[in-house]
Image (cartoon, rainbow, N blue to C red):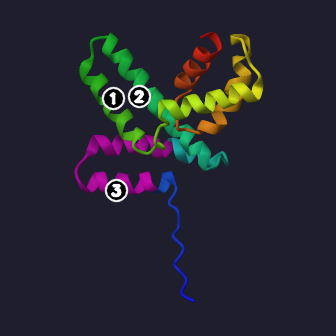
Amino acid sequence: MDRLPTLERVSVLEQIQEDVKTALRAGERERAGALRLVVSELQKAAKEGKGESDEIAVLQRERKRRVEAAEAYSEAGRDDLAAAERSEAETIEGYLPEQLADDELEAIVADALAQSGATSPKQMGQVMALVMPRVAGRADGKRVSAAVKGRLTG
């Protein structure tokens, strides 16, 4: 009986480290610099003993930082710096899991509402506690919060 070779799953950290090398070979200094910062954050998380699910959390946090910085630069009239931050955010986004479609998110929220029995905005925390582990990096916290709030107030 022939056995298929088992493919090793490459961690996000290992993939980004390879992509840094590729970017450097291609002369993409800005991309390599952005990826190096992400590698540093992922290595910190790994040293703290956090697992693969936390790699996604690190990527989300780093993406959010870039988006917020881009907004701040835009407000200050520094469009050049804002564009650089947006570019870094897009680069990081490429390593995140595919985002949930709105209808998928709504279904998860509806299920969590039914499970928790929540009916008022005061119970939003209970619903969020059920939804967030289920979306695991596939939906931004703000988006989830808006969906839950919309169902509880709507």
Asked if the magenta segment contains residue 37, the reply would be yes
Labels 2 and 1: the sequence-earlier one = 2
46 shown above or below 110: below
Dot 3 crowding, Cα within 10 Å, few <14, some 14–19, many 20+: some
In terms of secondary structure, where does tag 1 sit?
A: helix
- 113 or 2, nearer to the observer: 113
- Residue 55 falls in which quadrant of the image? top right
- The residue under the point 51% across, 35% down is 60
> Could you tell whether 110 is left or right of 7 in the image?
right
**Residue at numbered disc 3:** 21
- The residue under the point 38% across, 15% down is 72
Work out how far the residue at label 2 is from the one at label 1, CA to CA, in angstroms.
Answer: 6 Å
- 132 or 118, nearer to the observer: 118
> Could you tell whether 128 is left or right of 26 in the image?
right
Kindly indicate whether the residue at mark 1 contacts the one at mark 2 (C-beta within 8 angstroms).
yes
Q: Position of residue 125 (x, y in %)?
A: 71, 20
**Residue at numbered disc 1:** 86
Labels 2 and 3: the sequence-earlier one = 3
Work out how far the residue at label 1 is from the one at label 3, CA to CA, in angstroms.
Answer: 22 Å
Work out how far the residue at label 2 is from the one at label 3, CA to CA, in angstroms.
Answer: 22 Å
The C terminus is located in which quarter? Answer: top right
Dot 1 crowding, Cα within 10 Å, few <14, some 14–19, many 20+: some
Q: Could you tell me the amino acid type at mark 3?
A: Lys
Labels 1 and 3: the sequence-earlier one = 3
23 shown above or below 72: below
- 97 or 37, nearer to the observer: 97
Q: Position of residue 150 (x, y in %)?
A: 58, 15
Give residue 66's mark: 2
Q: Could you tell me the amino acid type at mark 1?
A: Arg
Kindly indicate whether the residue at mark 3 contacts the one at mark 2 (C-beta within 8 angstroms).
no
Q: Which residues are magenta?
A: 15-40
